[in-house]
Image: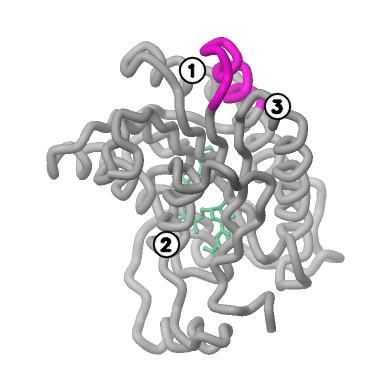
């Protein structure tokens, strides 16, 4: 029960890492607002929490719209009294049509989508959370989903650049708000198999054993990285166990960046 009586907002909570975190945070005692652009997926995740006796609400939220992000936090405050943890996790890998293009083949539309969701959307989450933490008198935790693609060269150059921005925002903000006892860290996963990437987040499917094996071979530890692995790292960073950890980019990458 690492988050007993805490309130968390998780963006991109309808699928993949976010969904895993919604379930895990709730199992650890948190009251969770599951915020996702896909209202059906958000409700599905929140309902899964309630079905096992936890507390979760779904909120449709497009992180590209500051008012949506504010509304997700306001929902947490109105329903549960406060905000303790903001997990800025929503992100996309590809162009809106799902194609993975080389940098030289990408246009303004791809650029705008990646920057607007992965960076600006996350920035709105950080700003809104810090404002709420201040209104509560200080303290609070932000966890961002960065990526190893923001730390080393990795396929998807423009995507990696947005994640590099997320990683750097995490460190800079951590210093700016440290004196207010607000901690800011990032979980940086390597390749996981989620909705992300393969079909532009448009639906769920189950990866084949061959795909899982291929992903596993990317990492020294040799096994695939699951969304739950990233959610576990987020839980630790969100909890008081990490009370003296801020400004950290925590790879969940099976040793990939070390190698
Ligand atoms: N899958 C990977 O290999 C991998 C690796 C490193 C980092 N990440 C990061 O992990 C995070 C989660 O990705 P995932 O793999 O779980 O993907 P996913 O596609 O399974 O889940 C992403 C969720 O974000 C939601 N979303 C998309 N755009 C949104 C928006 N504008 N506003 C609110 N919600 C939005 C989607 O509806 C979906 O529910 C992302 O930030 C991604 O960049 C993923």
Q: Eyeballing the image, is 158 above or below 69?
A: below
Instruction: Using the image as rendered, state which of residue 141 and residue 93 is in the foreground.
Output: 141
Q: Position of residue 94 (x, y in %)?
A: 63, 58
Q: Residues within 10 Å of mark 1 (few under 14, many from 20)?
A: some
> Residue 160: within the magenta?
no
Between disc 1 and disc 2, whose residue precedes? Answer: 1
Which residue was labeled with disc 1?
Answer: 71
Q: Quadrant of residue 118?
A: top right
Seen at 49% across and 62% down, the residue is 199
Residue 112 seen by the camera:
no
Q: Position of residue 142 (x, y in %)?
A: 56, 37
Q: Position of residue 40 (x, y in %)?
A: 32, 38
Seen at 44% across and 32% down, the residue is 9
Seen at 34% across and 66% down, the residue is 205
Element type where label 3 sits in the image: helix
The magenta stretch spans which residues? Answer: 127-139
Which residue was labeled with disc 3?
Answer: 179
The structure's colour scheme is one colour
Horizontal placement of 224 versus 50: left or right? right
């Amino acid at each position: 029960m690492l988050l007993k009586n805490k309130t968390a907002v998780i963006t991109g909570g309808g699928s993949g890492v976010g969904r895993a975190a919604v379930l895990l945070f709730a199992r650890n005692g948190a009251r969770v607002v599951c915020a996702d652009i896909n209202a059906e997926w958000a409700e599905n995740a929140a309902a899964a929490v309630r079905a096992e006796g936890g507390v979760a609400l779904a909120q449709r939220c497009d992180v590209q719209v500051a008012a949506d992000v504010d509304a997700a936090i306001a929902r947490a405050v109105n329903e549960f009294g406060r905000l303790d943890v903001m997990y800025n996790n929503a992100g996309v890998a590809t162009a809106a049509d799902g194609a993975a293009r080389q940098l030289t083949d990408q246009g303004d539309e791809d650029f705008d989508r990646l920057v607007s969701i992965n960076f600006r959307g996350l920035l709105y989450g950080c700003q809104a959370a810090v404002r709420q933490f201040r209104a509560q008198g200080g303290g609070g935790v932000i966890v961002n989903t960065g990526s190893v693609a923001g730390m080393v060269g990795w396929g998807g150059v423009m995507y990696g650049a947005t994640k590099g921005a997320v990683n750097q925002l995490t460190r800079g903000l951590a210093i700016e708000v440290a004196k207010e006892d607000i901690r800011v860290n990032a979980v940086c996963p390597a390749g996981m198999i989620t909705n992300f990437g393969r079909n532009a987040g448009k639906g769920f499917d189950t990866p084949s054993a061959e795909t899982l094996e291929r992903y596993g071979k990317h990492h020294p530890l040799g096994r695939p990285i699951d969304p739950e692995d990233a959610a576990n790292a987020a839980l630790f960073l969100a909890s008081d166990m990490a009370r003296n950890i801020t400004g950290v980019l925590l790879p969940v990458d099976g040793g990939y960046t070390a190698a």
